Amino acid sequence: MGSGERVEFDNKVVNWIDERLPLFTLMQKEYGVFPTPRNFNYFWNFGAIAMFMLIAMIATGIFLAMNYTPHVDMAFDSVERIDRDVNWGWMLRDIHMNGGSFFFIAVYIHIFRGMYYGSYKKPRELLWILGVVIFLLMMATAFMGYVLPWGQMSYWGATVITNLFSAIPFVGDSIVTLLWGGFSIDNPTLNRFFALHYLMPFVILAVVFLHVWALHICGSNNPSGIEPKGKQDTLPFHPYYTMKDTFGLLVFLVIFCVFVFYAPDYLGHPDNYKEANALVTPAHIVPEWYFLPFYAILRAITFDIGIPFTEITIISAKLGGVISMFGSIGLLLILPWLDTHPIRSARYRPKYKFFLLVFLAVFCMLGYVGSQSADAVFFGLPMTLIGILCTTYYYGFFLVIIPWLNNTEKGKDLPKSIHDAVLKTEREKA
């Protein structure tokens, strides 16, 4: 089928529309007969799952916005009204609230899959960068959404996070004033956060479109990390992977529904069910769980950096924490150029696989550190020390270990084709 040829459909209505606007031909080419590597595993489900969760978040968010009042005197009560008085409001809010967490779960697994199988390497660098941009937009959207209920943790979380920008030299105070819409967190802050939280998902949707477009230009990576060499290495996307994605999505939704209907508040913080009070500071301010690893990196920098033997400070502890936090995400953007090893998949790179799994454990540990108070102790070690050690490994993995492996790791022999890799796997199972 040539790129300019139109598909003939049996349905007369579909065919009539397609003759005038070939949307169905486009869908058939991009999602029907599109050649896809035949060795996908269930890790490849999470892109489709993330797309579904994004649509669910947008749909529920639109209905919630119809009943929400972005005013500091009424926001908390309007959320309570949605839960108690609006028809099906409790379900919409629980889907939206827990949907944010499950959206991040899907995206975190999607990112780890990309790191494990080398999906960021040539020719997929731009595809990876667009994915990291989506992740950054998600974080901004989730942060602003967390402020909207105007509970205690919403208010004080917003206070702490927005104040971080004041550490930026020269322009920091101006950025904070711009975010607040004044000289303290108040009604203008809530208004602009609501407006941006409503807008950002549509920006994410636009970047997702570019992400999928880039995917269909360069093609999908696969567990073996080798390019398809012919028809024996590929399958049409439909029905093989539409069915596999549907099964994976259904399993994911079963777990999601357990939280929505049986434990809707499990992933939330109890303090956020109290109305915001500027005169009462919570004992321990923590962000949502999906921010905790980066919050731990932020808190790990507790020292100033200056000129030795002088009192001159070049980078304050506060600015150092901000740089470390944003730098930890920035490393993902440049990962395609940090990892130049010719082998993509960790299946054939045992050393890289070991250090990556350690990195995953360290990242989870950072999440735990971020959830604890700074003076807490873990197996006799101060939590601040553990945060520093984990942050050091996080940066060391990208800046030291990966470049070292580029030059020292030989790796295993790659299969000649995806077809051979599939046959070898089947023989091992037998």
Image (cartoon, rainbow, N blue to C red):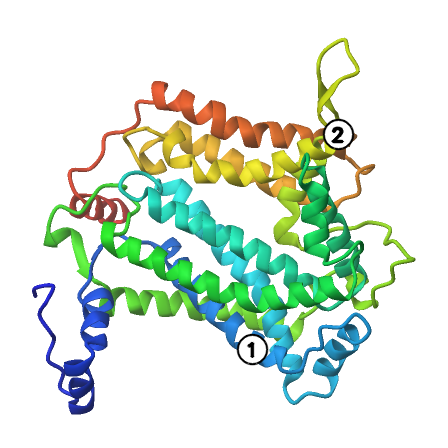
Which image quarter: residue 240?
bottom left
Q: Amino acid at mark 1?
A: Ile
Other residues around mark 2 within 10 Å, as few (<14) / some (14–19) / many (≥20) = some
Q: Position of residue 12 (x, y in %)?
A: 15, 91
At x 47%, y 62%, the residue is 203
Q: Amino acid at mark 2?
A: Thr
At x 66%, y 47%, the residue is 292
Q: Position of residue 118 (x, y in %)?
A: 35, 40
Total numbered circles: 2
Split into 4 quadrants, where in the image is the N terminus? bottom left
Q: Is residue 267 visible in this depiction of the protein?
A: no
Q: Residue furthest right?
A: 279
Which image quarter: residue 30?
bottom left
Q: State if disc 1 and disc 2 touch (CB < 8 Å).
A: no
Which residue is label 1 attached to? 62
Q: What element does badge 2 sit on?
A: loop
At x 45%, y 31%, the residue is 354
Which image quarter: residue 13?
bottom left
Which residue is label 2 attached to? 302
Q: Relative to residue 344, is residue 180 depicted above or below?
A: below
